[in-house]
Image (tube, rainbow, N blue to C red):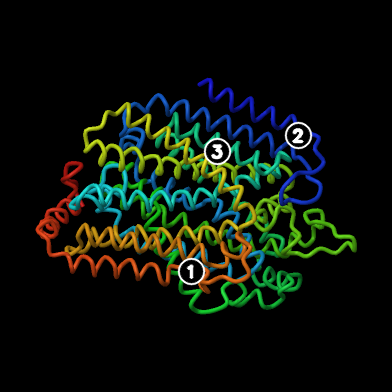
Amino acid sequence: MKVLHFLCSALLASMAARAHASSIEGPVPGHVELNPIAIGMFLLFVLVTLGITRWASRKTRTTKDFYSAGGSITGFQNGLAIAGDYMSAASFLGLSGMVFVFGFDGLIYSVGFLVGWPFVMFLRAEPLRNLGKFTFVDVIAYRFQQAPIRLMTASTSLVVVIFYLVVQMVGAGKLIQMLFGLPYWMAEIIVGALMVTYVFFGGMVATTWVQIIKAVLLLFGATFMAVTALAQFGFSPDEMFRRAVDVHPGALSIMGPGKLVKDPLNALSLGIALMFGTAGLPNILMRFFTVSSAKEARKSAFIATGFIGYFYLLTFIIGFSAIALLAQHPEFFKSPVDGHFNLTRDLLGGSNMVAVKLAQAVGGNLFYGFIAAVTFATILAVVAGLALSGAATVSHDLYACWLARGKANEAREMRISRFATLTLSVIAIGLGILFEHINVAFMAGLVGAVAASANFPVLVASIFWRGMTTRGAVAGGGLGLISAVLMTVLSKSVWVDVLHQAHAPVFLDNPALVSLPLAFAGIWIFSMLDRSARAQRERDAFALQEFYGQTGLLPVKAVDH
């Protein structure tokens, strides 16, 4: 536990060194007022979560404990943890910021994320739990050739994990930057160090309980914020909308579509990515292996759906109420020479800090400190889950099941997992600094496109289509991954905004409209063309796989359904 002591000391030292800073480096302009309450709650949360990690380390002895908490998590607990994964920086900071800037159009992210959840998870929660061991790759690889399948799916999973880590790291870096007055790059290093600590010592047990505690606190905080904000309008949504229209630079246009997504093709592509991207997020899928049975997996999906839907309603209220209420607080904005500020462009910290600033406006410094600490908890819990899923991909899918052919030494596998966690942390810190100025909700859309195009088609076809073969899975997954990444790089968000080129070669801001159908087409074409003896054996094995997937006889004893 010397590492935990070192991290706490380093964090306190960094704070003290900057305690009297009058401004900060990075994108947050102007004077930064350090809030002692927020800082105190932030440090309290770090200490509590490190205590949870220490407790969890005593319960983490085997790879099963490390990857899946030994299957000891209940359906209700897992549902809260899954909801916690959804209630991330992209949801709380990014979505409320999207509504604040674009109005009604910001709802496309909320609706897209939510609609895909029950459709995908209620269909797949049971076979996922029954066929897999630690990761969703176990499900795909059940009846196919191990080496090519695991190499391909590990590649797609790592791309998704790294993209999503960037989303969370940006939000965490901004938050610590505002709380402590630290440079953005230093804030990223602090987050990366804490992420490594949680996964190194606590594994899935620590990650799950941090998620559960964070989910409860965030639901309470967001509910209190929404209710308190609505009270300013006499609990009248009509009055809230009217006052928002009066002060927003977009005026009445914020009540209609077209400000964020300006054409039908881009809207359709973004919707596809958000809906089906859920089904390809490794950190979400990994949670279904932490429960004891398929029955508990279905219960997890049901509980998570309710909490997620409720939370997205709150982000809509938070975003619209912030338009009217933050306009009454000029101290939250940069002050130009003429004394006038732009509501959507001049907010200190950018649009990602709308929810945090609203907490200060409606609840004072005490509530601001609470929300800031809980938001940071949100990000830390998600990045720990992402790091764990990425580490499991490297140590379990690539090393244990492929290179070691299922005969891996547990101690060596754990060492590889921890080394992978360190590597992912370094990559996440570097990319988090590079993508500092990208709105985190938009980056979540890019994550969804890659997950929807590379992981979702292969997983769905492996569970429900007898005809898929190894050749088809590798070709389709590879086409989805390459097309999604290539079109993302060539889109405006990267080609123009990051690489500073004049024009983007691809007009779609999100590639899912092209990349997802291309992946399914690749799976179907290459599977149908595969007439080898191995392909026939793989098709014949589907009946037994379906039996195991429905009954649960493979990993555990059959249970009552």
Q: Amino acid at mark 3?
A: Gly
The quarter of the picture where residue 14 lies is top right
The residue under label 2 is: 18
Q: Nearer the viewer, residue 220 or 197?
A: 197
The quarter of the picture where residue 207 lies is top left
The residue under label 1 is: 270
| Side of 400 relative to 316 (left or right) | left
Q: Secondary structure at mark 2?
A: loop
Does label 2 or label 1 sit earlier along the sequence?
2
Q: CA distance from mark 3 to mark 2?
A: 20 Å
Residue at 75%, 40% in the rendered image? 35
* Residue 108 screen position, x and y as percent: 52, 69
Question: Neighbour class for label 2 at 10 Å: few (<14), some, many (≥20)?
Answer: some
Q: Amino acid at mark 1?
A: Leu
C-beta proximity under 8 Å, tags 3 and 1: no
Identify the residue at the far top of this view: 2
Identify the residue at the far front of this view: 501
Q: Secondary structure at mark 1?
A: helix
Does label 3 or label 1 sit earlier along the sequence?
3
Q: Is residue 171 above or below residue 482?
A: above
Q: CA distance from mark 2 to mark 1?
A: 41 Å
Does label 3 or label 2 sit earlier along the sequence?
2
The residue under label 3 is: 192
